[in-house]
Image (cartoon, rainbow, N blue to C red):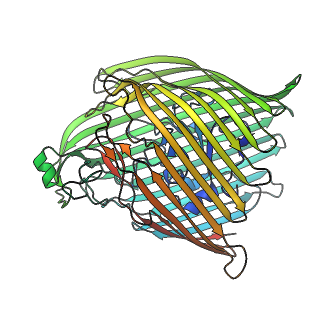
Amino acid sequence: MRGFVATRTGTATKTDTPIIETPQSISVVTTDQVRNQGAESVGAALRYTAGVSGDVNGGSDTRFGGLQIRGFDMTMPGLYLDGLRVPSSTYVHFLGLEPYGAERLEVLKGPSSVMYGGSGTGGILNYVSKLPTAHQFGELSVAGGSFNRYQGEFDIGGPANKEGTVLWRLTGVVRDGETQVDFTKDNRIFIAPAVTFKPNDATTITLLANYQKDTAGWGLQFLPAAGTAYSNLGRYIPNTFFGGEPNFNQFNTELANAGYLLSHDISEAITFRQNLRYSWMSNEQKSFYGTGYDSAADQAAGVMSRGGSAGGSTINSFAVDNQLQGKFVTGILSHTALFGIDYRNTSFRDMASFYSTGKINVFAPVYTNAWTDEGSYDDKDVRQSQLGIYLQDQIKLGRLSFLLGGRQDFATTDLDDHIAGRVTSTDASAFTTRAAVMYNFDNGVAPYFSYSESFLPVLSINAAHELLKPETGVQYEVGVKYQPVGVNALFTLAAFDLTRSNVVTFVPGSIFSEQTGEVRSRGVELEGTATLTEGFNVRGAYAYIDARVTQDPVNVGKVPTTVPYNRFSLWADYTLQDGPLAGVQVGGGIRYVGSTFGDDANTFKVPASTVVDALVAYTRDNFRLALNITNIADTRYVAACYGTTSCFYAEGRKAVAKLTYRW
């Protein structure tokens, strides 16, 4: 996929449908955009996407949390790999998956349970893997830059035989590096093989896998609001400050995914597809984190209290999606119908223990490397199975099209809480629907209206050690898409009204959760991508989101933390095509995030931020040398606060130079 403009997607409908004919807002980040912007994480790759943030908690978060779509946190329920959900435990998830292994990232906004079963209200992020191609190619890169980061990448593949019936691809990354936070490593090994077999013209099967090992520390620092979001007697904590203990600082993760993508044309009108995958993750972590100032005297002195934990998680998940697609005509109507049955079985084990240590001065830290094990506070096994049966019909009458879909889900969740000595099991089921209408004019304008629902069996427990009720969501969306005739561009304007019910929140100072009621998010998004001439790419995005708590014992009418009213971004890059400077590429972008409330009661605000990114590159023959600088002014700002004791800095200036050879 060349340039920034994607024209087709399978995420929204699970059929190969043009985006201009898809009656729901979807954003696609292409490989070229990831490369030109120098994105080193999935979160960074989403920085120029309307209504979406992939690094709410800041770019130094080595846990890679903070995926927000339309005002809702989708970190745990929102990630999909090649159309199949990759699950999470209480403490770890798959959002750290290496972006170099992705062909593109697709964000489907709003409830999507008709197609994907148990999923979050805000939407889903589908990581589409790089697959083998019919042409021989190769790419090798070496990079180095800020925070002592050194990285090597390779991506090679092509036909394995003369007939072209066997194709292969191998992608890999090796990194040795740190983050802007002192004492924090960020090392990685990633490898992703894929082989495609085409035994005949009707059948294609691709075997694909990936393995990733991260050896890191805790880049995410829990800091007080006084000294970050606002001053502490005129002083601010450096964004390099490490609030833990250097010898008690670990976030190590191994993950693997293996499966296949099968497609078989039964006839010209009927196609069967089966996507299957097994996912595994193992995590070990330990850290001390800030718990705020204990007194006014401590705040004046800059002395922060700390708590600590150590533990691990293991996740195993099997998922399969069977699809039968048929194309037929009834009278004046043409249909693309899809019938599917999918199944997912997930289990995970979480264990964690409390640790205590002394206070630390946030302006003049002295590390003691002394701590005490206070005993285990979490030890549980969770198993969840989900079966879904769905039906979708895309109906066309000339330029008028309708989309109708329905799904029945059955879910069973079992919790074995070893601390409480209690086993809990709960069943949940739901029927969800989606309906939409769209008209495609000759001039490329396509207005639409859609309605969609979501259903999410949650894995959280309350103080009584009981599993909570499923979350549900409903969205109304009206919009217009525009694909100018003869121009490689796509524009989307969408307005939405989105309600999330049975909202799960953590009880302050506890590992338990509660369901506080309902949150409504209303907003408008404008997004445009264009490759106007050879080598000239533009992407712009704006989102206005008004999120409010509509049902809650305390905070009705309040704005949820971390959700700004306004978010704006604009990126452009151009490569000179002729003359003595042919091959020189310059680009840059600006990102604005409005102020957010720092606590549930809306008692203080996190200030707005504006940062600028830049690109300079030169391509000659098979070589490309590029320099990417993000936050070029090294602006110090807070990415998010979750109360007065948990504020997270965004990433400061980062410069990375990369040399790439292609053949």
Up-down relation of residue 411 to residue 175 (above or below) = above
The quadrant the C terminus occupies is bottom right
- Residue found farthest to the bottom: 580
- The mark tally for this picture is 0
User: In this image, 230 relative to 537: left or right?
Assistant: left
Please provide percent x and percent y for residue 551. Answer: 39, 23
Instruction: Name, please, the residue furthest toward the left.
Output: 297
Whole-percent x, y for residue 466 in the image? 35, 20
Does 323 sit above or below residue 95?
above
Q: Where is residue 660 in the image (x, y as percent from the top left)?
A: 60, 70
Q: Where is the N terminus found, in terms of image quarters? A: bottom right
Res. 436 image quadrant: top right
Left or right of 417? Residue 441 is right
Nearest to the observer: residue 473 or residue 269: 473
Where's residue 537, x and y in %? 65, 60
Pick whichever, 241 or 560, lies toward us. 560
594 or 184: nearer the eye?
A: 594
Q: Is residue 180 visible?
A: yes
User: Can residue 9 be seen?
Assistant: no
